[in-house]
Amino acid sequence: MLAWADREASRCCTELDRAEALRLLGSVSLGRIVFTQDALPAIRPVNHLLHHGEVIIRTHEGAALTSLTEHAEDEGVVVAYEADAIDPATHCGWSVVVTGYCHLVTDPDDLAHYQALLHPWADHRMSYALRIRPDLVTGLRLSPRA
């Protein structure tokens, strides 16, 4: 078995361009949304879909992020969204972080469309959808060193 330092040295880290990072983000359905709640960072696991380059999540009435976006200014609420696929044995894979403004989806047709495509896995009635515009997209790929 390789020592930790040997395993670490056997991988290389490559930055992903925006297009590849968004493609990978769209290939998975689970991520973590990061926002500010009571002046402190809050993180929630959520499922998502990527639609026209924007991250869509569903939420419920009373959720902290729903309340924040309902009372936000025009620009929305700043959030970060992270998703990854990293093999626990090899520590190889990728991680993508999207940072941008989050808005409530208010168009009834858009909301119905997202409700049909994105099914919640939590035991809440998810009657809201949020749209994250990815202003900053970063990503890393960890792969075996050649």
Image (cartoon, rainbow, N blue to C red):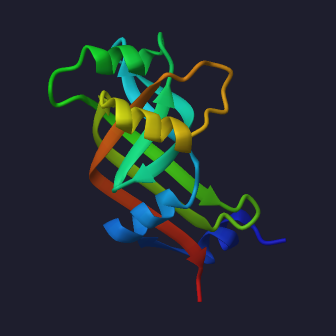
Residue 40 image offset from top left, x and y in percent: 38, 19
Q: Quadrant of residue 28?
A: bottom right
Which is nearer the eye, 116 or 92?
116
Residue 125 image offset from top left, x and y in percent: 59, 19
Which is nearer the eye, 128 or 80?
128
**Furthest residue in direction left, as rendered:** 74
Q: Residue at x 45, y 56 (%)?
A: 96
Q: Residue at x 75, y 67 (%)?
A: 3
Let me know if residue 83 appears in the view: yes
Q: Quadrant of residue 67?
A: top left
Which is nearer the eye, 89 or 31?
31
Q: Residue at x 52, y 50 (%)?
A: 83
Classify residue 27 as left or right of residue 7: left
Q: Residue at x 47, y 10 (%)?
A: 62
Residue 72 image offset from top left, x and y in percent: 23, 19
Which is nearer the eye, 8 or 36?
36
Q: Quadrant of residue 107?
A: top left
Q: Dividing the image into 4 quarters, which one contains the C terminus? A: bottom right
